[in-house]
Amino acid sequence: MSPPVLQVEGLVVRMRTEGGVAEILDDVAITVPRGGTVGVVGESGCGKSTLLRAILGILPKGAETPRGSILFEGRDILADHAESARGRIGFVPQDPYLSLNPVFRAGDQILEIMRRHAPGSRADHRRRILDLFRAVQLPDPEAALRKFPHQFSGGQRQRLLIAAALACDPALVVADEPTTALDVTTQREILALLRGLVVERGLSLLFVTHDFGVLASVCAEVTVLYAGRVAENGPTRAVLDTPQHPYTRMLLACHPDRATDLTGIPGTVPAATAQPSGCRFHPRCPIIRSGCPVEPPPLEALPGGRAVACPWHADAIPEAVHG
Amino acid sequence: MTALRHLLRDPVAALGLLIVILAVVIAIFAPWIAPYPEDAFESHLMQRLRPPSVDFPFGTDNLGRDILSRVILGTRNALLVAVAVVVAAMAIGVPIGLAAGWKEGWLSETLMRVTDVFLAVPQLILALALGQLVAPGIGAAMVALALTYWPFFARTVYAETRRLRSALFVDALAGIGASPTRILFLHVLPNAAPAVLVRATIGMGFTILTAAILGFLGVGAAPPSPDWGLAVSEARQHLPEAWWFPTFPGLAILLLVLGFNLLGDGLRDAADPRLRRSRR
Amino acid sequence: MALYVLRRLLLALPALFGLVILTFVLSRVVPGDPAATLAGDAATPAQLAEIRAQYGLDRPIMEQAVIHVRQVLTGDFGRSIFSGRPVTEEIAQRLPATLELTFAALLLAVLLGVPLGLVAALNHNGPVDHLVRLLSVGGLAIASFWLAIMLQLVFSMDLDVLPLRGRVDVAIGLPPRVTGFLLVDSLVAGRLDMFGDALRHLALPAITLSLPGLATIARFTRSGVLETLQKDFVLYARAAGYGRVRLAAIYVLRNAVTLVVTQVGLLFGALISGAVAVEAIFDWPGLGTYAVQAILSSDYKALLAVTLVVGVVYAVVNVLVDVAQALIDPRVAEDAG
C-alpha cells in the first residue's frame, strides 16, 4: 500500500483576536490516501476552513505558529507554509465570483500559475489549459482564454477554477465548499463534473462542505469536526447510516441534508475564545456524564475503519430532545 | 463619545488635536504670549534682520520686528480667516447639498451641474481673480475662498442626503406626516454631520494654505498685518542672508495645516466604522 | 471602447459650457464696470462710451453673452489689455511651459508615490508605513511657495548646484520651437547640452509642485493595496502559488491603481493651482505667471482666457483618466454601457 498523499497529525491552530486567544483547531488528524476522496463536514465556525488554510499555507495574519504536522507526499509542509507543495496541491475555492482578479484575463491568471509550477513552454501550457477547458466542458475554450472573469457565468467560473486547480497536474485537490455560491442546477452539474474528474483522473480529493448530500455524492470517507476537534470519522456511507457521536446523530436527525445549524439542539456553538473544558460538546450533549467536562475524550477506533471521540457512543439519545 | 475615545487612541489623530488646541489657545492669548506684542505694527529699524538669539528666538525681520511675536500674532489671523471662510462655505454648500439630494428632478440636476462647474475651475485662479476684481485685500480674499470651497460641502451633503433618503427611518417619518424641511434639518442633517465635520476640518487646513498663497502673491492680507504668507513673501528680497525670515512663518503654516489634516484624517476614521475596522 | 471615449467627451461638454457662462458672468457682473477698469481712473465720459462701443459693452447683456460664447468657441479671446497682443497667441506660447512643468511633477509624483504607497501597505503598521503616512499628510500641509523658497535657499543659493529661476540659461539658448516642450525640442534638435540645461531648470519647480501629488498618490496607493490585499482573489492567488513579488507588484497593484488614477484626475486641478505660485517664484514663463500678471494688471480678458484654458485642460485630463481607468479595469467601460 502506497503512503497517503496527505497526513495531518495533531494539528493545533490558535488565533490572536480581540477577545483573547482562540483555539480554532485542537489535535486534528486527517488522512487522504492516494486516489482517495475525503470530506470534512461541520457547521460554520467548526474550523474546517482553517484546516484548509493551514494545509494551503495561507493562515491569516493573527494566527500563531501552528503545532503538529502536515505531511504532504511524505514531507512536512507546515513549517514552510506549503511553499514546497505549490502547484502540487490544486485549490478550488468557495466563491468563484470573488476568487479571480477582475482586471486580468482568466487565461493569463492560470498561465501565471503554470509558469511558476508546471514544466514546459508557454505553448505547452496553453495546450494543456485548452485540454482542461474541454475536460471541464467550458464552451469555446479558445475564446475563454481571452475573456475577463466577469464575462463568465458563475458555473463557468467554477469550471474555470477547477481547470486552474488541475493545471499543474497536482497530487491533491483541495476544494472549499465549491458549490455553495451556485444555484441548485449548476451545483448538480459541477458536482457531476467533479465526480467524473475524480474517477477519470484518479484524483486525490479533500472536500470541505456542510452539506451531507454533497458529501455523500463525492466523498468515500468523511471526518466530522465540532468546535475545532474531530468528533468522528470513517467511510461516508457508514457514518451517515449509523452515526456514532451524539453530535453527528442529532445533526443527522434534525437536518438529514445540511449541517448548517443546530436549531433542533439546545445551546449554541461555543465561541472559539471560550471553549468548554473536556469534551467540547458536553454543554449540549443529551447523554452527558460526570467525566465529560473533565477530560477530552480520545478518538477511539471502531470496527470498519471508523473512529469516534465519545466513550458513550453506544448509549441511546432520549426521545424528548428531538422535538 | 466612542468616536472621541477612538480618536484619542489613535496617536496621529491625537497629535493633530493637540496642535489645533494649542493653536487656538495661542490665538486667543496671543497678545499676552508674544514677547513683543507691539511688533504687530511698530518697526525698529536699528535691529533689522538679526539672526535668532536669546532675545529674538526666531530672529527679526526687515523692519526689525520680532518674528516669534509676529508668528504668534499671525495665528489669530490665520484661524479667524479659516473659520470665517469654512463657515461661509458651509452656509452656501450645505443647503444646496440638502436641496439637491432630497428630490431628483431639474432643480437637483441644475444645482449639481453648477457645483461641477465651480469644481472644474482651479480654485486658486478663481480666488485670485475674484479677489482682485472686487477689491484686493483680506476681505475679498475670504469671499473668494468661500465661493470656491462651498462645492465641496455641497458634494458631501448631497451624497449623504441621497444615502439617508432611502433609509428606513426617513420613510417612517414621512409616513407619520413630518414635513420635508423638518425631516431634512432635524433628522437628515444630524446624520450627515460627521461627514460635514470631517470636510470642515480638512477645509480649515486647505483654507489656511490657500489664504497663505494669496497673501504671498499680494492679493490677500496687506502689510503690516502679521500674516504668515505675507511674511514669506517679504522675506524673499533678503535671501540668502536672512534664512530665518521665511523659515519660521512657513513652519507655522506647515504645523497648523498639518494639525488640521491629521485631525481630519482621524475624524474620518472615527466617523466611518468600516474604515475603523480595516485600520488594524 | 471608442464609443465609451466618445460618450465621456460628450459628458464633458455641459461642464465646459457652464464654465464659459461662468467666466462671462464673472467678467460682466462681478467687477462692476469693465469699461471703467479698462479706461483707467482719469477717463472722460466720452472715452468711456467709446470703449464701451469698442468692446460691445453697450449692447444688451444677453447679446453680449452670445458674442462671448461665439468668440470663445472660435478661440478668439481678444487682445490683452496689458501687452496689446492677441491673448490666444500669448497663451499658446506659454501653455507648453506650464504643461511641461505639471507633467514632470505628475510623473515624479507617480513614479515615487506608487512604490512608496506599495511598500507602506506591504509593511502595514511598520516603521516604513508610519513614515509614509506622515509624509502623505505632511506633503499636503506644506505651502508650495514656502517649499520653493526653502529649496532655492539650499540648492541654488547655498550649494549653488541648481539654477535659481527661469527655464533656460541665456548662454545656452533655446532649441528651435517644435512642440514648445524644451525637453522634447532639445532632443529633436539633437542638443544634449540644452536637454541637460532644461532638466536642471525643471528640477526644483517640478519637485516643489510634485509634493502634494506625491503625498496624495502614496496615500491612495497605500489604502488601495491594503484594500485589495483583503480580497479573496489574493488569498486564492497565494494558495495557487503566485510569486510574492509578482503578487504584490502586479496582481495587487493593478487593482489598487484604479483608485489612484481617479486621484490623478482630481490632482491635476490642484497641480495647476499650485503651478501659479510655483511659477511665480521660479519665474517660470507659463500660464501661472501669466495669470498673476493678468490679475495684478486687471487684464480681465487674459484672465478669463487662462481660466477657460485651464478648465478645458482639466476636463480633457479627466476624460483621459476615465479612459485609462477603462483600460485598466475592463468592467468600467461595460458598466457605463
Image (cartoon, coloured by chain):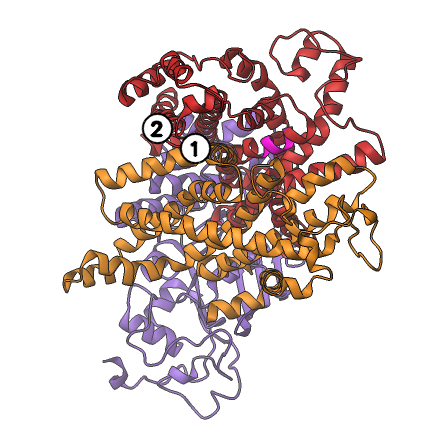
Q: Residue at x 45, y 13 (%)?
A: C78
The residue lying toward the viewer, choosing from B165 and C89, is C89
Residue B141: image location, x then y, percent: 50, 41
Q: Quadrant of residue B36?
A: bottom right
**What residue is shown with label 1?**
B120
Q: Quadrant of residue B187?
A: bottom left
Query: Hue of chain C?
Result: red
Amino acid tagged 2: Gly
Q: Which residues are magenta?
A: C274-279
Tag 1–tag 2 contact (CB < 8 Å): yes
Residue C46 appears in the picture as rendered: yes
Chain identifier matching the orange colour in the rendered picture: B
Please tell me if label 1 and label 2 are on a single chain. Answer: no
Q: Residue at x 75, y 10 (%)?
A: C191
Q: Is residue A254 left or right of residue C116?
A: left
Question: Total label count?
Answer: 2
Q: Is residue C299 above or below residue C142?
A: above
Residue A46: image location, x then y, percent: 45, 68
Q: Which mark is residue C314?
A: none
Q: Residue at x 42, y 46 (%)?
A: A98
**What residue is shown with label 2?**
C18
The residue lying toward the viewer, choosing from B226 and B89, is B226
SS at badge 1: helix
Chain identifier matching the purple colour in the rendered picture: A
Q: Is residue B109 left or right of residue A66?
A: left
The residue lying toward the viewer, choosing from A272 and C319, is C319
Q: Residue furthest bottom?
A: A290
Q: Which chain is home to disc 1?
A: B
Amino acid tagged 1: Ala
Magenta segment's dominant SS is helix
The crowd level at tag 1 (other Cα within 10 Å; few <14, some 14-19, many 20+) is many
Q: Quadrant of the C terminus of chain A?
A: bottom left
